[in-house]
Image: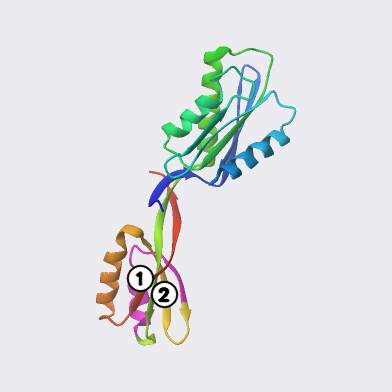
Amino acid sequence: MRSDYRTVKPYGESEYVIQKSRFLTYVKRTETEEEAIDFINEIKKLHHNATHNCSAYLIGEHDEIQKANDDGEPSGTAGVPMLEVLKKQKLQDVTVVVTRYFGGIKLGSGGLIRAYGRATSEGIEATHVVKRKAHDVMKVAIEYTWLGKVENEVRQSVYPLKEITYAEAVELYIYVPVAETDTFTEWMTEITNGQSAISSSEKVFLEFPAE
């Protein structure tokens, strides 16, 4: 499981017009190639009468799956420039589809490369880049007598409190970056004088604005 990576918010779109050609950009976070293909087909169906529906996607922790499709544009003038934008921004698990409605004026190879690159960049900007960071959801079980002190300490700390459950003992669920679980455990043990049971209940990703 990767610890953190750059991607986009779940979905976004934008529009760019040059020389009367409309470029409609659709961006989606996709974690499998199947999701990417389904999304591309969805946009193609939506714009079945468009001149072109070009696409590019990067999938996997190490960009294991990379695909680009010019969809009838001159080879290398659409899908590859789109893919290069994703790579340059170091994004992962992203699919982009740029739909073009031809306006009657040819752009030439260089013009197409610039247009598809710009359309992709504007689509990503409209969608917003985020950084996803892996966290352990740490479960801290304590006696009720410790609740006031522990809850207060947690709420004043850098660790977000997910929830508190009340049963025979109190259980606090706290988000902790995976690299800080040992530090957190030591801190919590010190706060409770060793009278707490601390364990990881699950691993999740939290999203933050990209740096």
The residue that label 2 is drawn on is: 172
Classify 199 as above or below 45. below
* Image position of 49 (left or right of 133): right
State the SS at label 1: helix
Q: Which mark is residue 124?
A: none
Residue plotted at (47% across, 82% down):
166
* Image position of 183 (left or right of 141): left
Tag nearer the camera, 2 or 1: 2
Magenta-drawn segment? 146-164
The residue that label 1 is drawn on is: 154
Point out residue 65 in the picture as x, y percentages from the top left corner. 50, 38
Q: Earlier in the sequence, mark 2 or mark 1?
A: 1
Mark 2 in CB contact with mark 1 (< 8 angstroms)? yes
Tell me the amino acid under the disc marked 1.
Val
Point out residue 164 in the picture as x, y percentages from the top left corner. 45, 75
Q: CA distance from mark 2 to mark 1?
A: 9 Å
